[in-house]
Image (cartoon, rainbow, N blue to C red):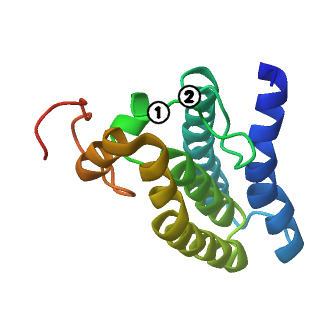
């Protein structure tokens, strides 16, 4: 699949989670104060940065996308992935929280909690067992050393001692 097509497919899921779902559950997109507006935008920028870097890593290093129909061919464990196993989902979650702060939306905040719960269940029951099957001991070592959600302080180096 061409790189441009991979990039387009890589944005289908985040656009759904960050734009389509929030716009269907929240109809008041006004900010209550300049503080919440600026804080929310800053938080959203951080989340978008994390998403952009990780999606790019999937395409460049993993030779695939975040989409299940075009998975990576190589396990990505460098860059942000050397600190936390799911930086892309954290980026989406941070962006959702930024959205909820920007417009002071409890509905979008609840959606972010639901999104996190769904992903935690999905990763535990499906994604991680699938990665163990696909990448074997390489993934198992990575999983033993890199947390799912809370980043470690030092980057993981394959072949190094367990933390």
Give the image quarter of residue 16: bottom right
- SS for callout 1: loop
Q: Position of residue 11 (x, y in %)?
A: 77, 42
Residue identified by numbered label 1: 76
Q: Position of residue 21 (x, y in %)?
A: 81, 67
Would residue 131 be found to the left or right of residue 8 on screen? left
Disc assigned to residue 129:
none
> Which residue sits at x=32%, y=50%?
143
> Which residue sits at x=26%, y=44%?
141
80 above or below 18? above
5 above or below 153? above
Spatial distance from mark 2 to mark 1, Cα to Cα?
6 Å
- Please state which of residues 28 and 26 is positioned toward the viewer in this rendering: 26
Would residue 85 be found to the left or right of residue 146 on screen? right
- Please state which of residues 120 and 127 is positioned toward the viewer in this rendering: 127
Would residue 125 be found to the left or right of residue 147 on screen? right
Give the image quarter of residue 19: bottom right
> Which residue sits at x=79%, y=67%?
22
Disc 2 residue crowd, few under 14, some 14–19, many 20+, Cα 10 Å: some
> Which residue sits at x=76%, y=52%?
13
Q: Are marks 2 and 1 in contact (CB under 8 Å)?
A: yes
Q: Position of residue 35 (x, y in %)?
A: 60, 56
Give the image quarter of residue 52: top right
Quadrant assignment for the N terminus: top right
Q: Position of residue 119 (x, y in %)?
A: 56, 66
Which of pointers 2 and 1 lies earlier in the amino acid sequence?
A: 2
- SS for callout 2: loop
Residue identified by numbered label 2: 62
Residue 104 in view in this figure? yes
């Amino acid at each position: 699949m061409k790189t441009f097509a991979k990039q387009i497919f890589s944005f289908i899921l985040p656009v759904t989670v960050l734009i389509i779902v929030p716009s269907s559950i929240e109809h008041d997109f006004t900010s209550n104060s300049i503080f919440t507006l600026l804080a929310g935008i800053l938080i959203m920028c951080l989340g978008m940065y994390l998403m952009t870097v990780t999606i790019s890593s999937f395409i460049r290093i993993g030779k695939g996308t975040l989409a299940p129909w075009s998975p990576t061919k190589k396990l990505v464990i460098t860059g942000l992935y050397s600190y936390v196993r799911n930086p892309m989902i954290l980026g989406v979650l941070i962006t959702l929280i930024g959205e909820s702060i920007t417009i002071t939306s409890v509905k979008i905040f609840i959606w972010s909690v639901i999104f996190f719960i769904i992903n935690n269940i999905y990763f535990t029951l499906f994604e991680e067992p699938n990665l163990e099957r696909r990448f074997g001991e390489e993934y198992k070592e990575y999983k033993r050393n890199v947390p799912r959600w809370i980043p470690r302080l030092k980057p993981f180096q394959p072949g190094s001692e367990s933390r």
